[in-house]
Amino acid sequence: MKLDELTKGVFKYNPVFYLVLGLCPLLAVSTRVDNALGMSLGVLFVLVGSNVIISVIKQWIPPEVRIPCFIVVIASFVTIVDLFMHGYAPELHARLGIYVPLIVVNCIIFARAEAFASKNPVSHSLLDGIGMGIGFMFAIVGIASVREVLSTGKMTIFGYTLIPQFTQSPAMVMLLPPGAFLTIASIMALINYKKTMKKEKE
């Protein structure tokens, strides 16, 4: 049971490809893999922390003010992430810009707080946060990998070149929102195709 809580967010109920949540930061920062890694680690930290705290204090939160209380908890963890990035990764913090504070209103985090953490024990909420955070990380890093390679003809992560320049005519449209939508749609189509084929075999 507990293992299912961890893996459902990565595969079965991936927040991006299945629940279609968190697309705003995904579209904005997935032009580079290092940006995607920084954002996804921030979201993972906030998601796990807020899930655990909300699950702990849920019995003392009056139903009438649960949403403001959830926002205060989430905003506290986002402030920690924002200050940490600003102090230890200023270049990454500058590139992510407004999207770091906007983690407060990330629909993945609020949805898990409202739909899961406020109704389940701490251990399950912890695993749910980790699973959903890793699922978001896989999605945004995968999309960023495709966009960076196709738009620049190479891949560089925090100064280290993983894929050297292989073309002088990259597809610059992949840096724009249409490129992000095209990448997301292609991956979702592939996932749905595999699911359909699996059901037909069964």
Image (spheres, grey):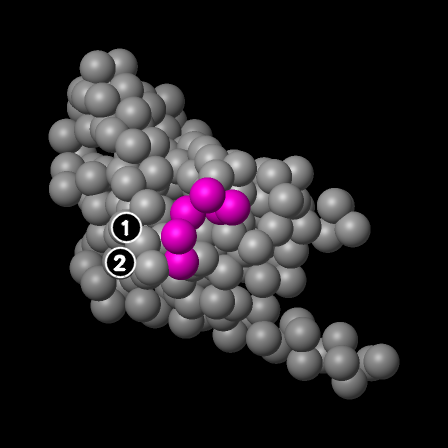
Q: Residue at x 20, y 39 (%)?
A: 101
Q: Position of residue 173 (x, y in %)?
A: 21, 61
> Marks 2 and 1, Cα distance to the nearest angstrom?
22 Å
Residue 36 falls within the magenta-colored stretch:
no
What segment is highlighted magenta in the picture?
58-63
Q: Which labelled disc corresponds to residue 68?
A: 1
Left or right position of 177 against 17: left
Residue 20 in sight here: yes
> Residue at the location (28% across, 63% down)?
179
The one nearer the camera, 132 or 168, is: 132
Query: Tag 1: residue type?
Result: Pro
Q: Which amino acid type corresponds to the residue marked 2 in the rendered image?
A: Cys
Q: Secondary structure at mark 2?
A: helix
Tags 2 and 1 in contact by the CB under 8 Å rule? Answer: no
Q: Nearer the viewer, residue 123 or 136?
A: 123
Between discs 2 and 1, the one toward the N terminus: 2
